[in-house]
Image (spheres, rainbow, N blue to C red):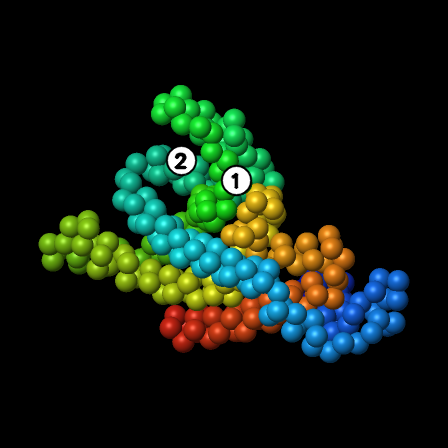
Amino acid sequence: MYIMLLPAIILALIFCYAPMGGLIMAFQNYKPWLGITGSEFVGLDNFKQIFEFKESYQAIINTFIIAVSKMVLGLIFPIIIALLLNEVQNMGLKKGIQTLVYLPHFLSWVTVAGMLRDILGMDGIVNMFLSKAFGMNPIFFLGNAGMFRQIVVISDLWKGFGFGMIVYLAAISNIDQSLYEAAQIDGAGRWKQTLYVTIPCILPMVIVMATLSLGNVLNAGFDQIFNLYSPLTYSTGDIIDTYVYRQSLVNGQYSFGTAVGLFKSGVSLFLTAVAYKLAYKFAGYRIF
């Protein structure tokens, strides 16, 4: 078994752990022509700049708002759909709905972003409908900073809620059927069975999913934002990951971009540790 694990361990060491040596750039005034060994060491100066630039603050705020919105809706909506789908008695219809809502999970954000641009573009389906039905002028949805966060959250929910729904359907299927029989004997209808049997029984799974999602509070989705945003929506759509990308690879500020990324990783590591601690305390969930 250890031999079977060896290729995965080697790949992880090469592509996940070895690159961590580059984090020293966060403490340097890195110059590509000097390399890591020849660049000047500046201590925590790059981290101080994070709190001096308005763009850094805005990226952190945007990341937090978008990520928390995704977490909350991504927790509530799959539970509701799973509870509703559990009431469908026709197995063919149930499996069909389950498959349809799960399919978007396998689409890349490049594909989804292309679909959204066709749907929400100036000459897209939505603007054509608004123009013909209400005589409205075209709306630049993806270029409107006030609408961008809502579009991001809703599209992420559409793409990913099917996966969460599968998790909760699996939890529901493991509920002891004798509990429902006892509830029926006590005169409970379908609504009260859901309220007093189904929801309490899946609550440990809900707690696990909610607490584990805390570690992603600073992950607002680089792939999605990068394929949808533009300079017009930086004020509400620019997140830490896209900000690091622009500062590092586009503007050439490698040290500052590395510092921002390391700051985000440090906070995420702390929140992940807290999340696992809470998951073990409230739901008995543990990895090791």
In percent of width and height, residue 251 lies at: 74, 55
Q: Quadrant of residue 114?
A: top right
Q: Which residue is mark 2?
A: 96
**Residue visible at 60% across and 67% down?**
264
Quick one: SS at disc 1? helix
**Residue visible at 17% across and 57% down?**
183
In percent of width and height, residue 95 lies at: 39, 38
User: Sequence-wise, which precedes: disc 1 or disc 2?
Assistant: 2
The type of residue carrying mark 2 is Gly
The image quadrant where one finds the N terminus is bottom right
The image quadrant where one finds the C terminus is bottom right
| Apparent side of residue 13 relative to residue 83 in the rendered image (left or right) | right
Quick one: SS at disc 2? helix
Q: Is residue 166 above or below residue 16?
A: above
Q: Quadrant of residue 207?
A: bottom left
The type of residue carrying mark 1 is Leu
Q: Which residue is mark 1?
A: 142
In percent of width and height, residue 173 lies at: 35, 52
Q: Residues within 10 Å of mark 1 (few under 14, many from 20)?
A: many
In percent of width and height, residue 11 lies at: 73, 60
Q: Can you name the residue that lies furthest to the top here? A: 132
Q: CA distance from mark 1 to mark 2?
A: 32 Å
**Residue visible at 39% across and 53% down?**
73
| Apparent side of residue 186 relative to residue 227 in the rendered image (left or right) | left
